[in-house]
Structure formats: structure tokens, C-alpha cells
């Protein structure tokens, strides 16, 4: 997601914060108010889960998606075909490194509408004939797009090599398979629900979401969603103490247990190959030193949104990835910036080729000429050190496993 600028701040640091939405302004706010009234304050992760993934009114179920036109935010695959073309080169190298297995399986988690798979397909990768690309996408609305833009095969055929590759499979959850290949996630982890801690009175507290009442009103009247601090669970407090040795009063950090669980499951899919995560992130201590509204953001229609407690389901909620928390689960990653990654895999060569094709074909003004010309602009966006170019590319290689391979039942 490219950040278009500063955002309004959620009320951070107060025992109870205002700036939250009045109930009734969206169906999900009513749901949450009713849930809190019945069960008491919920975690921020529960709010994020409801706001993004409620099957009817959640942001990704209802309207939200990446894209230049009509989208809410811009991701690297949606910038244009260049990101997929560079990734195709990396995939070829990783395929060769594994001894050119067939099938060579790429599991792309949080695949959105399938743009990355489509652009890799268009890049004529050397591994294409061996390739099975599994698109894992939670939103049914976005999964429907997969069949419109890609020739899908039935999930039961995912690992069959009877049909020549590339084979595309669309699934709502990670497959129950062991594969040789790559598990890939571009801008997935920042969308996974987080719990929030705050350092207050020399202790880690958890930010919960409950109901606040305007002062002076009768009890229950005009109740709105508001933040409360409760003592943090011991395991969360220990995690924060370990990762943030010297917090300042009011410092907040995310607890990314959902991302950690996903990472473990994703790594465990691999018999051999690599887990590759592309996202924006920082260490937990660095996040603690920054204002929360800088790393916990909302987006709508390419603009920054409002408080994460407002407009539930109508705006994206995204949290920078605490990379050290992932590393506690998976071990130290091989890490570089997206700009470094794309340069390593030949973006500059592809741009030079684009310039050459444009000069040869500009007078024709055909699709090849236009595609070639757009590469220059795409590269600028993908490499921008103040934007997508600064994203982190994290890799965890998985060596050949000794136990028997696929399929396994879990
Ligand atoms: C920010 S979008 C990124 C889409 C795409 N990867 C891109 O870069 O354009 C995140 C996507 O992850 C999906 N998602 C979130 N949690 C998921 C999960 N546990 N499994 C599969 N998809 C998930 C969302 O529905 C959404 O489409």
C-alpha cells in the first residue's frame, strides 16, 4: 500500500478515548456495540477481524480491494505487469535451485483478485510448464475474479501434472498439502488482526474496546465504542518486555499472534523451497517509539481514513508488521528492501528492454509499445525509496525435508 500522507489520529493514550463512531452509523458498529454490551470489552484484534472480514459487511467481503482505478490502495502487483515480470525471474532461479521439480508449487496467500498470478503468467517464465499456482484468498468476492482472469483447475487437480502447466487453483484457506516450491504473501500480514498493548504506569496494559457514554447523559444513552486499558496477559507482557526494553509512557505495540500462526502454517507447507513475505514493517521497539497512528492506519479510496473504531467495514485497517515477532516464530529472515530485491532480479534490465522496444515501436503506438513505455513509470513507483521500494522482502529458506512428502492430512 502506498501511503498518501498524514492521517487523523485515533485517541491514543487515554484510559477511555473519544473520536469513536456513534452506534448506528454502520451495521458492524451496531454488531460490535451489541457484542460489547453483552460480553464486555473486546480485543482490538476482534474489531479488526469484524471490520475487515465479516462475511457480509467486512471491508474485504463488501467492497475493498487493491487497484489503481476504483481501488482503495495500490499494491506492487497492481502498479502494472513489471512486478510480476521480475518475480517470474526470481521464481525461475528458485525452481532451478530446487532441481526443477514438477510440479513446482507457488502458494500465494492473500492473492486478492489474482493480479500477481496473471502478470507472472504473462511473463513467460521458464518454470511455467512445471508451475502450479495456488491462489489463497479469504474474500469470496475476490475469489470469484480468479476464474474470470485465469484458467482455473479443480483443487483436486492441484498437484496433478497430467495437464501441462501453468495450472491455477483458487482456495479460501491454505491447502492441506506439503509442496516443493514457494509460499508467497504480498501485503497479507499487515491485514491480519493484531492485539494492542500500551505502556502505562510502568506496566504493559492491553487496549480493549468497550462502550463509552457522553458525560452528563443517562447511563447507556448515546453509547459509543471507546478504548479501555486492562492489565495485559502475562505472555503478552513478557513478549513486550523482551522486545521493548525501554518503553516511554503511552508507547503502544502490536501483538501479532495471528500473523505468527499464519507464518508457522505457511512454513510447514513446504517440503523444500522458501517462504517469501513482502510487506511494510519495523521492529517492535521501533514501532513503540513511533506514534501509533503512524503504523496502525486506515485507508479508503486511496486516501487515509479515520479512526480504526469508526466506519467499520468501510475502510481498510492495516498494521505494520513487527518483523522481530515473526522471527521469534520462524528464525532470522534473509531480508532486504523491495528495491534491492527487484534490482537483484533484473528490474533494470527489463526497464532497459522496455526503453528499447518503445524506441523501435513508438511510431506504431501498439500494445507492445505502450507496455514497454509504461515499464519506466512502473519501475519508478516500485523502487520509490519513500514508498513501495522501502517495503521489506523477508525470506525463510526451507531445506529438503527427510520425512515423506505429499499429501499429508492435517
Ligand atoms: C492488502 S490485500 C493484498 C492483495 C494482493 N496480495 C496484492 O498485493 O495486491 C490483502 C488480501 O489478503 C486477504 N486475506 C486476509 N487474510 C487472509 C487469510 N488468512 N487467507 C487468505 N487471504 C487473506 C484479504 O482478503 C485481501 O484480499
Image (cartoon, grey):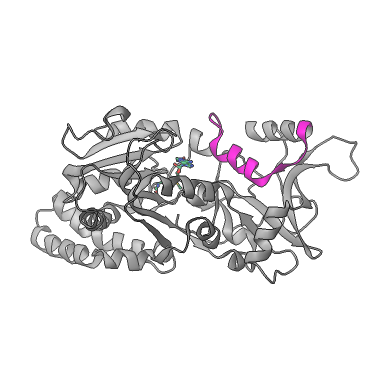
Please tell me in which quarter of the rendered image ligand 1 is found. top left
Q: Is residue 212 left or right of residue 258?
A: right
Residue 214 location (% of width, % of height): 84, 44
Residue 223 location (% of width, % of height): 79, 38
**Residue toward you, 57 or 218:** 57
Q: Is residue 125 left or right of residue 217?
A: left
**Residue toward you, 175 or 299:** 175
Residue farthest to the bottom, as pictured: 246
Residue ID at (74%, 63%) = 250
Q: Which residues are magenta?
A: 38-58
Q: Is residue 201 left or right of residue 319?
A: right
Using the rendered view, name the quadrant where residue 178 is placed.
Answer: top left
Q: How many marks?
A: 0
Residue 384 location (% of width, % of height): 38, 66
Q: Does the segment drawn in magenta span residue 319?
A: no
Q: Does the segment drawn in magenta span residue 48?
A: yes
- Residue 355 in view in this figure: yes
Residue ID at (58%, 59%) = 295
- Which quarter of the rendered picture does the C terminus lie within? top left
Quick check: 198 above or below 216?
A: below
- Which quarter of the rendered picture does the N terminus lie within? bottom left
Residue ID at (17%, 31%) = 162
- Residue 301 in view in this figure: no
**Residue toward you, 221 or 225:** 225
Using the rendered view, name the quadrant where residue 38 is placed.
Answer: top right
Residue ID at (72%, 59%) = 198
Amino acid at each position: 500500500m502506498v501511503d498518501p500522507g498524514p492521517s487523523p489520529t485515533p485517541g491514543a493514550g487515554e484510559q477511555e478515548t473519544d473520536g469513536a463512531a456513534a452506534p448506528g452509523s454502520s451495521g458492524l458498529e451496531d454488531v460490535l456495540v451489541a457484542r460489547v454490551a453483552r460480553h464486555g470489552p473486546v480485543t482490538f484484534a476482534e474489531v479488526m477481524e469484524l471490520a475487515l472480514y465479516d462475511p457480509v459487511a467486512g471491508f474485504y467481503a463488501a467492497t475493498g480491494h487493491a487497484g489503481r482505478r476504483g481501488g482503495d490502495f495500490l499494491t506492487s502487483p497492481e502498479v502494472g505487469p513489471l512486478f510480476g515480470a521480475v518475480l517470474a525471474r526470481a521464481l525461475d532461479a528458485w525452481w532451478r535451485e530446487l532441481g526443477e521439480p514438477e510440479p513446482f508449487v507457488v502458494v500465494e496467500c492473500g492473492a486478492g483478485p489474482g493480479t500477481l498470478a496473471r502478470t507472472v503468467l504473462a511473463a513467460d517464465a521458464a518454470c511455467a510448464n512445471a508451475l502450479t499456482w495456488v491462489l489463497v484468498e479469504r474474500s469470496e468476492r475476490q475469489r470469484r475474479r480468479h476464474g474470470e482472469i485465469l484458467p482455473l483447475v479443480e483443487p483436486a487437480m492441484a498437484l496433478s501434472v497430467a495437464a501441462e502447466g501453468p495450472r491455477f487453483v483458487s482456495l479460501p484457506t491454505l491447502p492441506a498439502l506439503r509442496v516443493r516450491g514457494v509460499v508467497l504473501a504480498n501485503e497479507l500480514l499487515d491485514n491480519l488482526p493484531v492485539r494492542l498493548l500500551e505502556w502505562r504506569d510502568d506496566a504493559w496494559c492491553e487496549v480493549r474496546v468497550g462502550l463509552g457514554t457522553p458525560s452528563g447523559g443517562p447511563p447507556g444513552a448515546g453509547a459509543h465504542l471507546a478504548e479501555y486499558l486492562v492489565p495485559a496477559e502475562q505472555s503478552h507482557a513478557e513478549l513486550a518486555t523482551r522486545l521493548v526494553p525501554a518503553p516511554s509512557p503511552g508507547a503502544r505495540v502490536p501483538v501479532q499472534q495471528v500473523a505468527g500462526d499464519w507464518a508457522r502454517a505457511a512454513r510447514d507447507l513446504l517440503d523444500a523451497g522458501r517462504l517469501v513475505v513482502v510487506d511494510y514493517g519495523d521492529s517492535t521497539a521501533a514501532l513503540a517509539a513511533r506514534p501509533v497512528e503512524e503504523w496502525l492506519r486506515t485507508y479508503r479510496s486511496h486516501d487515509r481514513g479515520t479512526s480504526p473504531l469508526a466506519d467499520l467495514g468501510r475502510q481498510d485497517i492495516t498494521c505494520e508488521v513487527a518483523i522481530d515477532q515473526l522471527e521469534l516464530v520462524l528464525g532470522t529472515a534473509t531480508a532486504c528492501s523491495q528495491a534491492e530485491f527487484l534490482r537483484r532480479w533484473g528490474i533494470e534490465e527489463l526497464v532497459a528492454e522496455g526503453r528499447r522496444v518503445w524506441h523501435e515501436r513508438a511510431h506504431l503506438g501498439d500494445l507492445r509499445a505502450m507496455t514497454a513505455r509504461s515499464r519506466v513509470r512502473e519501475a519508478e513507483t516500485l523502487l520509490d525509496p519513500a514508498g513501495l521500494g522501502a517495503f521489506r522482502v523477508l525470506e525463510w529458506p526451507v531445506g529438503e525435508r527427510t520425512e515423506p512428502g505429499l499429501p499429508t492430512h492435517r
